[in-house]
Image (cartoon, helix red, strand yellow):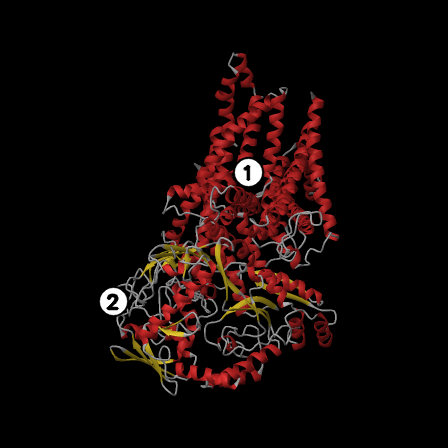
């Protein structure tokens, strides 16, 4: 165990302190290498799914695909877009200095290399040669400075990405080097530099088109219908993208998504339900991968009778997570008991033994009796009605709680109402929802601090707050991971909420296509997708 | 000739009564007892096609669809009856007062009913549900509000027609109180007209309730409702078409039965006159 | 003339009331536009900035009247929610203008269905009913009665699902949900519209045919028919020359009301078939609290409904001058 940790330590240290993109640090070559590797990997997926032989013939350039998406775009401004459904598309148009890869690591994008000072306060980025915006202009340090100042609020006093508030100054050292100074050391800040680089001044002018450096450039957007992008011929990654055109089409419901897949009017759809996946498994490549969403029966720790830890624990015991997973996710979900994605392997601890993954009605009733509710109580679960997945989970959960004597009811609310009353107003007893995580390990744990603005479950635990402060201050990744493990345990044992599962993203891909990569974060990368003739 | 015609009216009445009766019995029984639990789930019984054990098959949670249809019938009929009761009573009161007295109150009420009528009814229920929240009683309240104007219009026009009738004038001269004139002298005389709109109103209430549940703003799961079952079933149309057909055909059955029934009553009334 | 003045006044009053009601409703219902747009991840500064951009920091009364002022000047405002491009929000006029053709074409195709089928059907029906002694006539009358009753009992969403299942999944005549934009391929667009239009038209066909039958039977009993027969007119001439023409007048007004209903947006059918029309825009704008869009759509729908009723009213006056004397 010790040894394994030290290997992680070495790896993380190399990445975080020596900076750069990969151990050898030479940007360009390592980049090419990694992209080739991933194409090969995806081809393997293809080969195992479809008939062999296609992989050897290799990718074919050209063609267009239609990708079904669930929600409308909230903004085409990459810094102002907040919806996950928008970011997954804009990933194809915009890039930051760094970007995530399919393994959950950061790779260099607009920057070819970066360095972080020992004290964690100074970030030095070296720009990649000849990265061009979609308008043909080469990315300069001015563009980087403008973009970073815009998101951090240095430009007009309105920070657009909260973690970027830490930036104190952005200085241009020479025509290839930008230095960023931050107020406090935070080893996780580097993940925020995925923020898009846009042309200097473009946020203010009346440019008709969003301009970035990504593999695809923007063509058109029609509200309620979708967004069309086309190949960026000058993309800095040699040989990418393969496709000429991608049409992200909004489908109005998962039901019509299924029908459209069957009818051939969309080629790729990433959010299939289990039963849909079953219907498509013969005609499509259907692949499941863990999402970056933590689904839970969130309990308002300040609402009676959930302010009693025994009641919360009773609920955790009463739930049969295996059954939830089976009914709503077809067994493809990953069961969890605290707020960390299992895909973030270095920081995740498995706590599923604490309450077990099947129902323990005896124990639940015992705890309820101890808490003074031998006959159970009434529980109203507010669920955003636009999420069929959460609504179905609600039906299963209500049935399971009934067995333990808890009389639960579902209150379906509109998403806007949910945000207003449940998330911001905290006027609720329990809710079923999902919280999305980015690649930063501490991201999910951060919100459960007593004073956090995002602590919508009103979790209040001084020990937790103190531990989080220590974790935040720790520069050593292993130490940090240890604190994170303690935090997860505390949250689980105190039954802050009843964590259920990390649902799988089940994606259907046309059998004609190959090269689709799965990310541990919420993105759809179309740059590596190609037609295998 | 006459006899033959009479036979035809009875056919409407009999068919209507039989269909409505079956649905009502199913609903009443479903209120107290169903062959299987309407909520118990079973992974082993998912999507069973109709069989002797489950005559309408089972759904995505392995629940018996027939039991849920029974419960859905009872919910739908109960809600629709209450909606007709509430909106009909309110319609009579408002229509009687505005029709008989006229004046500024009449003007105000009519403008409001115009506005409510102009508003698409789905939209109005959507707004009211957003205000009140979901739940059975809020469905009843919102549908009642939506349906009041139609009753007001009919009652009002009847009261306007009758307020100047000779026997009412005489009653006024004899010093009969206003309330008595309104509800003892005029009201019984509009019932034949009012009944027809109540019949239509009941059917509209059933369609509206299932429509709301279909859009997810009506009865909340895990309670069964015909409309919600339909919207859930839509995603499984290809693999489990029975899931959609069972609640859908049940709605058609209730509505058709009731309209045959009211057609039958209308025709037998025509015959009497 | 006084009549028109009064009607116009009523129209304006109703529109005003409706707009106030919608505005008030948006003040009361839970859900804040800013959080609804920005979600859970935005910084407080950004929320404040957006609130100011949208003018939400002014008092409600000021906002309402500045909105009324803008609308009277012909400026319908911009959507809170839909952006046109990176920096501009979508003008409501463009957004609605983009969706309106879908709804209007849907209405047109449905109306064609209704007219083409219901009128011959109604005439056939009336003819059968008027020959009740004839065995075939009697059978047809009864059969059509049952069929139309049944059709009218099917709720629109179930009909939509049935049409999807039959024509989309079993017969594969069309791809359910595979809507084709009218801008890309107009004929493909119309082809797709056939099926939602069919779902809208079926119950209306039953209603119209039923209405036409009853209207014709009433006409057949009137004096002029007897006179025409006694003058030696053929049955055909009486039926098509006199009866149908007179019976059509109330049917036309009935059709008018149906048009009003469809043009106002078939929310449910658009939802079932995934048509990006007025109805769907309305539903999604309500759920995202996109007030400028909702307000305009509600006004549009109210206007269409009232205006068509108004036309119907005028038509009645033309047919029956006695009404206007009252």
Q: Is residue C7 above or below residue A175?
A: above
Q: Is residue C311 above or below residue C67?
A: above
Q: Which residue is mark 2?
A: A137
Subunit of label 1: C
Q: In which quadrant of the rendered image does the C terminus of chain B lie?
A: top right
Q: Which residue is mark 1?
A: C203
- Let me know if marks 2 and 1 both belong to one chain: no
Percent x, y for residue A463? 57, 84
In front of the other: label 2 or label 1? 2
Q: Is residue C204 above or below residue A193?
A: above
Q: CA distance from mark 2 to mark 1?
A: 60 Å
Kindly indicate the quadrant of the structure image that contains residue A523: bottom left
Subunit of label 2: A
- Near-viewer residue (A202 or A514): A514
Question: Mark 1 falls on what kind of element?
Answer: helix
Q: What residue appears at the point 72 percent right and 67 percent down from the top-left corner?
A: A405
Percent x, y for residue A426? 56, 70
Q: In which quadrant of the rendered image does the N terminus of chain B lie?
A: top right
Kindly indicate the quadrant of the structure image that contains residue A412: bottom right
- Near-viewer residue (A268 or A428): A268
Question: Mark 2 falls on what kind of element?
Answer: loop
Q: What residue appears at the point 62 percent right and 19 percent down from the top-left corner?
A: C134
Q: What residue appears at the point 50 percent right and 32 percent down from the top-left corner?
A: C117
């Amino acid at each position: 165990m010790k040894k394994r940790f030290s290997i992680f330590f070495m790896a993380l240290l190399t990445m975080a302190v020596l900076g750069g993109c990969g151990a050898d640090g030479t940007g360009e070559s390592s980049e090419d290498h990694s992209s080739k590797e991933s194409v090969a990997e995806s081809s393997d997926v293809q080969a195992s799914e479809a008939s062999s032989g296609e992989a050897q013939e290799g990718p074919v350039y050209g063609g267009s695909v239609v990708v079904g998406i669930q929600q409308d775009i909230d903004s085409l401004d990459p810094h102002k877009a907040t919806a996950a459904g928008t970011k997954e598309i804009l990933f194809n148009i915009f890039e930051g200095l760094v970007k995530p890869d399919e393994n959950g690591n950061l790779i260099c994008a607009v920057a070819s290399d970066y360095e972080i000072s020992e004290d964690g306060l100074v970030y030095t980025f070296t720009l990649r040669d000849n990265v061009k915006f979609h308008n043909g202009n080469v990315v300069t340090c001015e563009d980087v400075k403008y973009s970073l100042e815009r998101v951090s609020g240095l430009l007009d006093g309105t920070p657009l990405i909260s973690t970027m508030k830490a930036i104190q100054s952005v200085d241009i050292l020479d025509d290839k080097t930008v230095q960023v100074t931050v107020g406090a050391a935070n080893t996780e800040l580097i993940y925020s530099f995925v923020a898009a680089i846009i042309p200097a001044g473009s946020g203010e002018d009346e440019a008709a088109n969003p301009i970035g450096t990504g593999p695809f450039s923007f063509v058109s957007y029609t509200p309620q219908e979708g967004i069309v992008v086309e190949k960026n011929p000058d993309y800095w990654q040699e040989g990418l993208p393969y496709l000429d055109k991608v049409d992200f089409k909004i489908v109005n419901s998962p039901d019509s998504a299924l029908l459209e897949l069957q009818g051939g009017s969309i080629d790729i759809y990433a959010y299939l339900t289990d039963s849909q996946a079953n219907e498509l498994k013969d005609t499509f490549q259907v692949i499941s991968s863990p999402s970056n969403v933590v689904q839970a029966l969130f309990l308002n720790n300040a609402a009676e009778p959930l302010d009693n830890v025994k009641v919360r624990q009773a609920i955790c015991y009463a739930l049969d997570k295996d059954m939830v997973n089976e009914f709503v996710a077809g067994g493809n979900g990953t069961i969890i008991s605290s707020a960390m994605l299992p895909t973030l392997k270095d920081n995740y601890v498995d706590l599923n033994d604490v309450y077990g993954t099947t129902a323990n009605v005896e124990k639940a009733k015992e705890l309820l009796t101890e808490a003074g509710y031998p006959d159970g109580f009434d529980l109203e679960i507010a669920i955003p009605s636009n999420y069929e997945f959460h609504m179905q989970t609600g039906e299963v959960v209500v049935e399971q709680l009934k067995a333990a004597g808890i009389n639960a009811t579902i209150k379906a609310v509109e998403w806007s109402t949910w945000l207003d009353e449940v998330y911001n107003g905290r006027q609720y007893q329990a809710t079923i929802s999902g919280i999305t995580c980015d690649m930063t390990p501490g991201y999910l744990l951060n919100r459960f601090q007593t004073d956090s603005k995002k602590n919508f479950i009103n979790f209040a635990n001084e020990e937790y707050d103190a531990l989080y402060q220590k974790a935040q201050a720790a520069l050593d990744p292993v130490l940090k991971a240890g604190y994170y493990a303690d935090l997860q345990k505390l949250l689980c044992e105190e039954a802050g909420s009843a964590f259920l599962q990390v649902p799988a993203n089940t994606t259907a891909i046309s059998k004609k296509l190959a090269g689709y990569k799965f990310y541990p974060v919420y993105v759809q990368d179309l740059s590596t997708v190609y037609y295998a003739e | 000739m006459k006899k033959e015609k009479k036979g035809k009216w009875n056919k409407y009445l009999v068919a209507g009564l039989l269909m409505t009766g079956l649905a009502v019995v199913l609903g009443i029984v479903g209120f107290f007892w169903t062959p299987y639990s309407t909520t118990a789930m079973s992974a082993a019984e998912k999507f069973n096609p109709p069989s002797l054990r489950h005559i309408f098959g089972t759904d995505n949670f392995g629940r018996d669809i027939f039991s849920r249809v029974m419960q859905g019938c009872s919910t739908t009929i109960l809600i629709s009856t209450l909606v007709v009761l509430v909106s009909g009573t309110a319609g009579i009161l408002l229509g009687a007062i505005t029709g008989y007295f006229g004046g500024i109150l009449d003007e105000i009420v009519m403008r409001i009913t115009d506005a409510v009528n102009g508003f698409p009814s789905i939209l109005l229920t959507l707004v009211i549900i957003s205000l009140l929240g979901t739940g059975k009683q809020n469905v009843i309240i919102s549908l009642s509000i939506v349906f009041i104007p139609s009753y007001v219009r009919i009652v009002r026009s009847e009261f306007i027609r009758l307020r100047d009738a000779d026997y009412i004038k005489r009653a006024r001269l004899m010093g009969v109180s206003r309330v008595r004139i309104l509800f003892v002298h005029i009201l019984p005389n509009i019932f034949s007209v009012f009944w027809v709109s109540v019949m239509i109103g009941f059917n509209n209430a059933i369609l509206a309730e299932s429509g709301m549940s279909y859009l997810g703003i009506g009865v909340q799961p895990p309670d069964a409702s015909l409309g919600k079952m339909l919207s859930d079933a839509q995603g499984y149309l290809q693999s489990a078409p029975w899931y959609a057909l069972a609640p859908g055909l049940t709605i058609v059955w209730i509505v058709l039965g009731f309209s045959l029934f009211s057609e039958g009553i209308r025709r037998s009334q025509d015959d009497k006159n | 003339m006084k009549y028109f003045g009064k009607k116009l006044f009523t129209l304006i009053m109703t529109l005003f009331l409706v707009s106030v009601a919608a505005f008030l409703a948006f003040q009361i219902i839970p859900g804040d536009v800013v959080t609804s747009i920005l979600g859970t991840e935005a910084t407080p500064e950004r929320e404040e900035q957006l609130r100011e951009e949208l003018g939400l920091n002014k008092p409600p009364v000021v906002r309402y009247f500045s909105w009324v002022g803008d609308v009277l000047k012909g400026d319908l405002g911009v959507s809170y929610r839909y952006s046109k491009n990176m920096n501009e929000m979508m003008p409501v006029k463009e957004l609605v203008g983009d969706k309106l053709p879908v709804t209007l074409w849907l209405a047109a195709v449905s109306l064609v269905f209704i007219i083409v089928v219901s009128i011959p059907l109604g005439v056939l029906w009336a003819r059968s009913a008027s020959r009740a002694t004839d065995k075939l006539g009697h059978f047809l009358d009864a059969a059509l009665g049952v069929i139309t009753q049944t059709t009218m009992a099917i709720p629109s969403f179930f009909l939509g699902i049935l049409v999807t299942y039959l024509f989309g999944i079993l017969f594969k005549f069309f791809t359910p949900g595979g809507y084709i934009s009218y801008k890309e391929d107009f004929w493909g667009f119309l082809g797709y519209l056939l099926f939602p239009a069919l779902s809208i038209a079926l119950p209306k066909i039953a209603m119209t045919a039923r209405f036409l039958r009853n209207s014709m039977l009433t006409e057949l009993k009137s004096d002029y028919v007897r006179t025409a027969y006694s003058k030696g007119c053929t049955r055909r001439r009486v039926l098509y020359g006199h009866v149908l023409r007179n019976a059509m007048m109330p049917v036309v007004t009935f059709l008018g009301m149906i048009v009003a209903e469809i043009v106002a947006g078939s929310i449910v059918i658009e939802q079932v078939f995934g048509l990006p029309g007025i109805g769907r825009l309305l539903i999604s704008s309500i759920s995202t609290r996109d007030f400028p869009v909702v307000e305009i759509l509600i006004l549009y729908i109210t206007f269409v409904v009232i205006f068509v009723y108004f036309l119907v009213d005028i038509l009645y006056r033309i047919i029956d001058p006695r009404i206007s004397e009252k």
